[in-house]
Amino acid sequence: MSVNTINEVFYSVVERNHDRVMLYKQTVKWIPISSRELYRDAVGVANSLRQWGIGKGDRVAILSENRPEWPTAEFGAMLIGAVVVPIYPTLTAEQSAYMLRDSGARMIFVSTAEQFKKVVAVRQQTALEKIVVMDYIGVPEGIPMHRLMHNGPAGRDAEFDAAARAAQPDDLATIIYTSGTTGTPKGVMLTQGNLASNLIHSMSEFAVSGPKDVSLSFLPLSHITARHVDYAMFYHGVTIAYCPFIDQLPSALREVRPTIMVAVPRVLEKIQKQVQLQTKTGVKHAVYKWAMRVGKANRAEILAGRRPAAFPWRLADRLLYSKVRKALGGRVKVYISGGAPLGRDLAQWYADIGIRIHEGYGLTETSPVIAVNKPNAHRLGTVGKPLANVEVRIADDGEILVRGPSIFKSYWNLPAETEAAFTPDGWFKTGDVGELDSDGFLLVTDRKKDLLKTSGGKFITPQPIERKLKSSSLVGEAIVIGDRQKFPSVVIAPNFAELETWARENNVAFNNRDDLLRQPKVKSLFDSIVAGVNRELAQFEKVKKILLVADEFTVADGSLTPSFKLKRRVVEERYRKRIQQMYAEQPEKPSQPAVVK
């Protein structure tokens, strides 16, 4: 079995002729979309684009939350050889304008009146000829998408199908702009073959197939991880339910009850902290602590894919673990994490409540999957073994290098950056540091650019330390700093919902968040959290100072990428003066962190 293009994925869906390939929520009811409806709507979009003179190689942008119109627009564009340019709906008008202008997009699909207004505000800076709106907004400049979809045939169009099936693996399919954690976003050019090459290999061994299996699509489709998951689900005949907004996720999980869940670590962290918050006092806390001890004792069974038979585990499952699964819909049989490092501590916590998470790894430039843990090849703390069609080697400086059919073509209009991204012998440089263990499992330790080098010449990988700190429900975000300094420090943005509750329970009076962070008891509290992590670190890694900040890092304020990765340099620049002042003062004790505010 093989698949060479995304157009082949589309026709695999059409030829199954299922009554339910997608689901969307209309008021209170989930509405199915059949294979026949998808074909009619996507071909209708394709026919309309052709009537407007859009064809092979022309760029078509999509600016929308997750909804069935997203893949309909994408398939419609790809079927005629157009190149899809996804844009995160959370980006500002100016950020969107840059991508539209740089890609030379001729038209754009937008979801709502709000997104329409955003595009109209910058349209003169772009080459846009048409704006198609998924919602009906009743303005002449916004072409209703349903009008395009109704332009589709009642049955199959043999001539159209033959032309669409003629797509080649080397045809450019999409330009995806990187999140820009360290600078101006670059347009990653991925071909039909790049996108299709990993679909078989990434999902092999996972027992998912047929419309009775359901995947909830809530990670932004503007990101390669979510698109790869949807392609894989389409190809394997799984029903996809679309959740447009992350705040709708809890209810969507309960209503759709997915059997497959693909999430980023940030979502999994929020679930963990919610469980901890709901079991923090009284009898519930005692049950939680006991159940976690039982789970830890049976962790190996869960990681091996077995359900423990011991009575204590079955009792703990009834009292705690099953309730967590129920909140996730109660039917999930495959849990996959990607998009960012999961972290050993978080993976262990889930294993201890009976959930084995299959962590994977990849980048936009690799379409995206490089490696993934699978049911029969799973190792905690790693991202699994490289896919069968991907080669991995470790450079002398520890950087992970890869090559294979999924590796991107080049950066859009950036030949120098493209050349710099590859070794002279053609291996892509991921920018990540890692190692392959003796059994071939890949460990990713940090981003190469994030490595800190102290003034004493010691290298520190910040992400493992940050993940340990964030395992506390009181820590919302943690950023370890200290490059070219004598010692590492950390910027902590507390989880204020939890911290304010703690303050009231401990009789700590405060007027606002800044005032709360100045309280001695609060400083002592974070001292103890950092000290606990320090006990697990080498001497040169120990955090000496803590900067508490009253901000919550978000996509809107520019400190997180749309895929929820922290923009480390943005945070460091935001607090540059306070960090400089902090380092101007010597730590109180070499082994004891000092909180500054």
Image: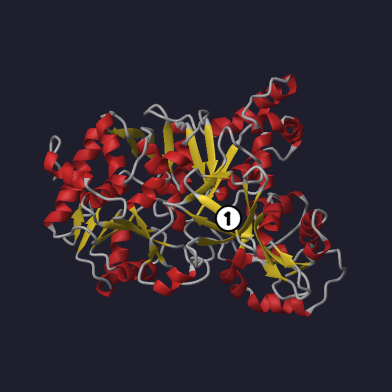
Q: Quadrant of the N terminus?
A: top left
Q: Is residue 553 left or right of residue 246?
A: right
Mark 1: secondary structure: strand
Where residue 382 appears, as percent x and y from the top left, is: 63, 46
The answer to whether 561 is drawn above or below residue 78 in the figure is below
Q: Residue at x 19, y 65 (%)?
A: 129
Q: Residue at x 74, y 59 (%)?
A: 509
Query: Does residue 191 sit above or below 520 in this rendering?
Result: above
- On screen, residue 360 versus residue 87, left or right, reads right
Q: Label 1, on which residue?
A: 393
Residue 580 in the image, given as x and y percentages of width and height: 70, 79
- Looking at the rendered structure, the kind of residue marked 1 is Arg
Q: Is residue 151 above or below residue 327?
A: below
Its colouring scheme is secondary structure
State left or right for residue 174 relative to residue 402.
left
Quarter of the image for the C terminus: give it. bottom right
Question: Going 71% across and 50% down the picture, which residue do you hit?
Answer: 472
- Out of 413 and 508, give the one closest to the viewer: 413
Given residues 44 and 447, the one toward you in this image is 447
| Mark 1 nearby-residue class (10 Å; few <14, some 14–19, many ≥20) | some
The image quadrant of residue 30 is: top left
Is 582 drawn above or below residue 272 in the view shown? below
Seen as rendered, the residue at the extreme right is 589
Q: Position of residue 418 (x, y in %)?
A: 43, 68
The reply to whether residue 215 is visible in this rendering is yes
Q: Residue at coordinates 46% horizontally, 40% vertically from top-left?
A: 201
Q: Position of residue 341 (x, y in %)?
A: 59, 52
User: Depth check: 459 or 302 in front?
Assistant: 459
